[in-house]
Amino acid sequence: MAILDIARMGHPILKGRAHEVTNFDDPELHTFIDDMKETMVHAVGVGLAAPQVYVPLRIVIFFVPEGRDGGPAVPMTVMINPVIKPVSDTMEEDWEGCLSVPYLTGVVPRWTQVKYSYQDVDGSLRERSAEGFHARVVQHETDHLDGVLYPMRMIDIATLAFTDAQDEDDEEGQDREGESSDDASEEVSDSETSAPAL
Ligand SMILES: [Zn+2]
């Protein structure tokens, strides 16, 4: 296994359409997926797409941590050649981060409920439904396969921020509030700034 370099926004590999995987018997495919998993864990991300590690193939890995967004956890999933369909037109906005856009976070609209299909590492077709954070991760990662980064999906570019600058703002706010700052307000501010790295 190996930890792979992660491409950052601006590199051409992140701008193109990745190619479908057709040969599931290729041992190099399985070695590469193992390397993607190790790279994602090392980078403390919850999702990673092959173009982010300079490989233009339609491969995504992700998981949903326990308790995230109040929804169920989803174990580590390898999606090959994924296809997403929205269940309805309803969208919701939330904060996102990206391993290819380090130090930044922004508010991104995503479909709240989707159905998606993909092939697993053996080439078998799988189908799932997702909502909330699970649906968000799948949409973010699949966008990477079509050359789309989350800032391109943002409606209000004014929300684009450095994550550590948001923390500074929180600290100043708490200083102003002094000892009257209660736990509830801290919880809200924590969740607002806990953008996942995808
Ligand atoms: Zn990303």
Image (spheres, rainbow, N blue to C red):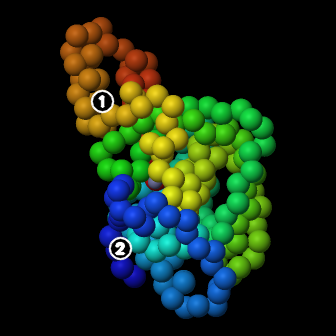
Residue 138: tell me if it is visible.
yes
Residue 89 position, x and y percent, is 74, 35
Q: Which mark is residue 19?
A: none
Crowding at mark 2 (Cα within 10 Å: few <14, some 14-19, many 20+)? some
Identify the residue under disc 1: 166
Please determine whether, in this image, residue 122 is positioned above or below residue 185: below
Crowding at mark 1 (Cα within 10 Å: few <14, some 14-19, many 20+)? some
Identify the residue under disc 2: 4
Q: What's the amino acid at mark 1?
A: Gln
Q: What's the amino acid at mark 2?
A: Leu
Taking the image as shown, residue 114 lies to the left or right of residue 7, namely right
Front residue of this view, candidates 106 and 156: 156
Please determine whether, in this image, residue 194 is positioned above or below residue 66: above
Indicate yes or no: mark 2 CB to ligand 1 under 8 Å. Answer: no
Residue 37: tell me if it is visible.
no
Taking the image as shown, residue 19 lies to the left or right of residue 42, namely right
- Which residue is found at the position 41% from the left and 72% from the top? 54
Residue 189 position, x and y percent, is 39, 25
Mark 2 and mark 1 lie on one chain; the one further toward the N terminus is 2
Residue 62 position, x and y percent, is 54, 60
Please determine whether, in this image, residue 59 is positioned above or below residue 14: below
